[in-house]
Image: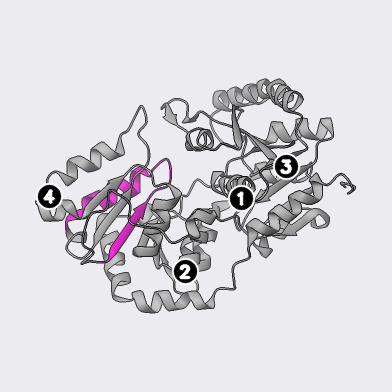
Amino acid sequence: MKKILISGGHLTPALALIDYLAKKEPEIKIIFAGRVYAQVNNRQPAHEYQLIKQRDNALFEPFNSGKWGNGHLLYRLQQIGLFFISLPHALSLMWHHKPKLFISFGGYLAVPLSLVAKLLGIPIITHEQTHTAGLANQLIAHLANRVAISYLETRKFFPPQKTVLTGNLIREKIMTQAKPPRWFRLKQTQPILYITGGSQGSEIINGTSGQIIQPLLKDWIVIHQCGSKSKMRNYHHELTQIKQQLNPKMASHYLIREWLNETELAWVYQQAQLVVGRAGANTVAEISLYQIPSILIPLKISRGDEQTKNAQQLAQIGASFIIDQTDLSPQLLLEKIRFAQANLIQMRAAFKKLPPLNDGLKAFVQLINVFLSPHVTKK
């Protein structure tokens, strides 16, 4: 049996790859090294732990490491210590499972695993989702045999001789026709507005949209994906308290979900007329696929301001509006939503200006198979 070890900060393309291999190449066994908690201090469960556990072709191995980045001196010393502690753990994982290939999806977890894979002579492929490049992936690129990128302009961040344009890896289930989920029991008499802050949720998006939910519900059915609860916050509970103050008809049109699985999300994308959310690479790729107008609020702490660069791709063609997080207010968000509502036809038509999306999943699997073939020299 061929084994592949996968890790990294971008979960969605990893899930796309795991599910594709389960269907097309079931002889490949996946080991996923990841976090049990997204935020250890808050005890917020990591979706990678929950979602990998659900998949028969993948084994989850708990793994953690130190983060590279800014912070006060004590924090940085702690993270350096965690990084060095992670190296023997990475060696143990590689030695025990003996994978034929290590695949990184960026992020601090993948750095020690890449170092150990290089030491043991295990081929490395790393994938960059975004228009820019994170520090971890720039470091891993020097160890990797191949660097797969989603956008041509990202090539400048990596060694050209080992960089390959594959495109982003989009989950196949996201692209399948889906039925309404059980929790949606409405007759759809109003358009659907989808609000999302990602798997961990966004305090500022949840809080701001919660303040304008009553005027929004006059024109929209709102599906609000708010993020999982943590030790510090329970967004679902907080938003439910707001919902309980609405009249029954309005309340029935406000649907709050901590998380959407792939089938639920596919249906929401197929029905939504407008999306409000962050500008992660996955979100931008998926709403581009479905050609949904959007209002994007980039996460400012992302390295190299990568989310703003992601959002600019859609804003420049007129398919999206960008709100800087520092400018965000309930009044501004409501104003932008109403303006988008009046211009949905033009915004949707603007997607025709985008170049065709690459089938990144198939291209990436072809790259993997080169390194799994016993007859090919891996350089």
User: Are the residues tagged 3 and 1 within 8 Å (C-beta)?
Assistant: no
Kindly identify the amino acid type of the residue bearing the numbered disc 4.
Leu
Relative to 107, say whether 251 is above or below: below
Q: Secondary structure at mark 4?
A: loop
Q: Which residues are magenta?
A: 191-214
Kindly identify the amino acid type of the residue bearing the numbered disc 1.
Tyr
Relative to 291, say whether 47 is above or below: above
Residue 359 marker: none
Label 2 or label 1, whichever comes before in sequence order: 1
* Image spot of residue 107 (x, y percent): 61, 40
Residue 324, quarter of picture: bottom left
Say which residue label 2 marks.
315
Residue 150 visible (yes or no): no
Real-space CA distance between mark 3 and mark 1, rounded to the nearest whole angstrom? 28 Å
Along the line of sight, the residue nearer the viewer: 16 or 64:
16
Tell me if mark 1 has few (under 14), some (14-19) or many (20+) residues whose alpha carbon lies within 10 angstroms of its own: some
Residue 50 included in the magenta stretch of the image: no
Say which residue label 3 marks.
139
User: Are the residues tagged 2 and 4 within 8 Å (C-beta)?
Assistant: no
